[in-house]
């Protein structure tokens, strides 16, 4: 039984969509809001990448709300069960109409999925262009701009193909004769492109950070800061894994039969993939404020430990002259680059 419906004794797996939809409808806007607040604190303004993420979250929110509505209608139930269920107990009083309305929501969500996918990847690339803004990173920025163009073109093409995948368009939600192209091949090609671009966007800044050729002059920062930054970027790998896992559910959903049932797993992983992508895109820009908050919390919690270090793990030792000189040079060399990475 679903948490949003009670079509007993019908089989109902709508919770697989309803639960992540409700969770991300709350979490995703909060992360985007936190990113914007951190950006305003650090730079006094919002940037293009912030607005792109706001646009992605603005689209993702109604997408999750639509899925919640779909769960209260026909998603997660077999179409043949809805046809035979007592009409007076169904929304709209008719199983056929209920299925059509549910599939209209599913059709709209495919468009929203494509738009969000393109927007948050472009937002990350625009952020890269902004923070790696030195003369010796021209090649890196050129690669980012090329990727922005490729993702934008592919996103528009995917939206167009999703709308016109069948003729007439209404066959996407009505049981009428239609002529469709190979939907299974199209969805797999789209998924492969998304996985490849996820991976590229995630690992793209690593050579520049670590000083790997051709970016020999990597950013100079402490090990802890570098590890934190790489950890934030590394979270994007989980989104790649989510997209790969989602691929196995494409074939059942593309068969165009009993779609209110067989599309559930694909929809669930699409929701997770989209919203996690937006959240991961927010994390690096929040690093500095998060670090500051955690440092204050540690200071307060260790206030009674006398001369212990902030971490409370090692005894305090006053630095000698050589150590102070090294710390001074390290801070001078890395402060500007790290400040750029944290906006």
Image: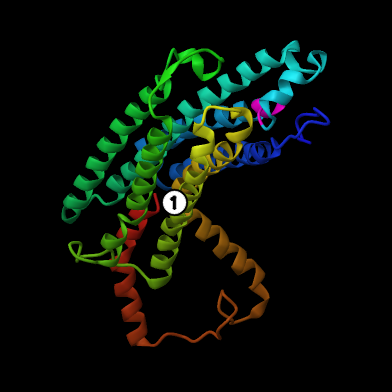
Q: Is residue 57 above or below residue 101?
A: below
Of 81 and 287, which appears nearest the observer? 81
Work out whether 332 lies above or below 39: below
Q: Quadrant of the N terminus?
A: top right
Does 71 appear in magenta?
Answer: yes
321 sits to left or right of 138:
right
Which residue is drawn at the image coordinates 46% and 49% (left, top)? 244
Q: Which residues are magenta?
A: 70-75
Q: Is residue 89 toward the left or the right of residue 319 in the image?
A: right
Residue for badge 1? 240
Res. 278 in view: yes
Residue located at (34% from left, 67% from top): 221
Q: Position of residue 79 (x, y in %)?
A: 67, 25
The front one of 317 and 35 is 35
Q: Which residue is at a point 60% across and 78% down the rendered structure image?
A: 312
Element under disc 1: helix
Percent of width and height locating residue 31: 54, 43
């Amino acid at each position: 039984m679903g948490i949003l419906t009670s079509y007993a004794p019908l089989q109902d797996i709508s919770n697989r969509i309803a639960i992540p939809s409700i969770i991300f409808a709350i979490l995703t806007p909060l992360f985007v809001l936190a990113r914007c607040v951190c950006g305003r604190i650090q730079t006094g303004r919002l940037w293009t990448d912030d607005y792109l993420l706001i646009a992605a979250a603005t689209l993702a929110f109604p997408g999750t709300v639509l899925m919640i509505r779909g769960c209260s209608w026909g998603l997660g139930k077999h179409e043949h069960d809805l046809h035979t269920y007592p009409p007076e107990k169904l929304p709209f009083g008719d199983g056929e109409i209920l299925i059509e309305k549910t599939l209209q929501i599913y059709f709209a969500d495919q468009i929203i999925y494509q738009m969000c996918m393109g927007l948050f990847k472009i937002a990350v690339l625009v952020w890269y262009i902004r923070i790696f803004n030195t003369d010796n990173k021209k090649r890196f920025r050129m690669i980012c701009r090329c990727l922005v163009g490729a993702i934008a073109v592919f996103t528009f093409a995917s939206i167009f193909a999703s709308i016109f995948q069948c003729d007439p368009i209404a066959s996407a939600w009505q049981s009428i004769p239609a002529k469709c192209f190979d939907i299974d091949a199209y969805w797999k090609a789209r998924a492969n492109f998304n996985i490849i671009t996820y991976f590229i966007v995630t690992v793209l800044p690593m050579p520049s950070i670590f000083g790997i050729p051709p970016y020999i002059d990597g950013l100079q920062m402490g090990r802890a800061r570098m590890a934190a930054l790489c950890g934030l970027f590394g979270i994007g790998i989980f989104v790649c894994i989510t997209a790969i896992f989602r691929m196995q559910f494409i074939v059942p959903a593309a068969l165009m039969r009993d779609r209110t049932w067989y599309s559930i797993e694909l929809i669930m992983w699409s929701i997770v993939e989209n919203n996690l992508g937006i959240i991961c895109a927010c994390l690096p820009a929040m690093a500095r404020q998060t670090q500051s908050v955690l440092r204050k919390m540690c200071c307060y919690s260790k206030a009674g430990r006398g001369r212990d270090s902030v971490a409370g793990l090692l005894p305090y030792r006053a630095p000698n002259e050589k150590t102070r000189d090294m710390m001074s040079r390290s801070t001078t060399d890395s402060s500007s680059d790290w400040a750029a990475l944290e906006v």
